[in-house]
Amino acid sequence: MFIAHLPAGYVLTRHLLDRAPAGDALSRRILAFGLLASVLPDFDLLYFYLIDNRQTLHHLYWPHLPAFWLVPAALSLPICAITRNRTLTLVSLVFHAASSCI
């Protein structure tokens, strides 16, 4: 599962970085952050294999629900709008877009 989410997270993060360029060092950090965020919903595989004993399809767990990822977005995006910090806004957009590549 991680292998499927990484290419999507890479393409999406590169696209966002191309549209809102940052410095080279910052771009590399944001790209790494986007890759981590793209596989974040699949960390429930640990629970699936180690605790649940594969009884429930892991796509039914709460990290795979789009409504769950709307909560952090609803909290962070207004903060970005209030502070008008471009770097914080870019990082927030990358996180929310990459983590919802489910």
Image: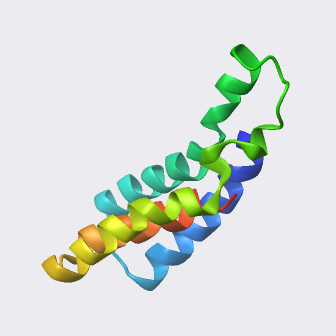
Rendering coords of residue 52 (x, y %):
74, 20
Residue nearest the viewer, comparing 20 with 101: 101
The spot of residue 21 in percent (x, y) is: 36, 78
Give the number of marks.
0
Which residue is at 70% across, 30% downward? 45
Above or below, 65 against 61 in this view is: below
- Asked whether, in this view, residue 13 is left or right of residue 86, the answer is right
Name the residue rendered at 69%, 15% in the picture. Answer: 51
Residue 10 location (% of width, % of height): 60, 60
Residue at (66, 40) in percent of width and height:
42
Question: Which scheme is used to colour this image of the protein?
Answer: rainbow
Question: With respect to residue 40, does 51 lie above or below?
Answer: above
Compared across the picture, whether 78 is left or right of 18 comes to left
- Residue located at (30% from left, 73% from top): 89
The furthest residue to the left: 83
Front-most of residues 68 and 88 = 68
Residue 62 vertical placement versus 50 (above, below):
below
Residue 84: horizontal and vertical position, in percent? 18, 82
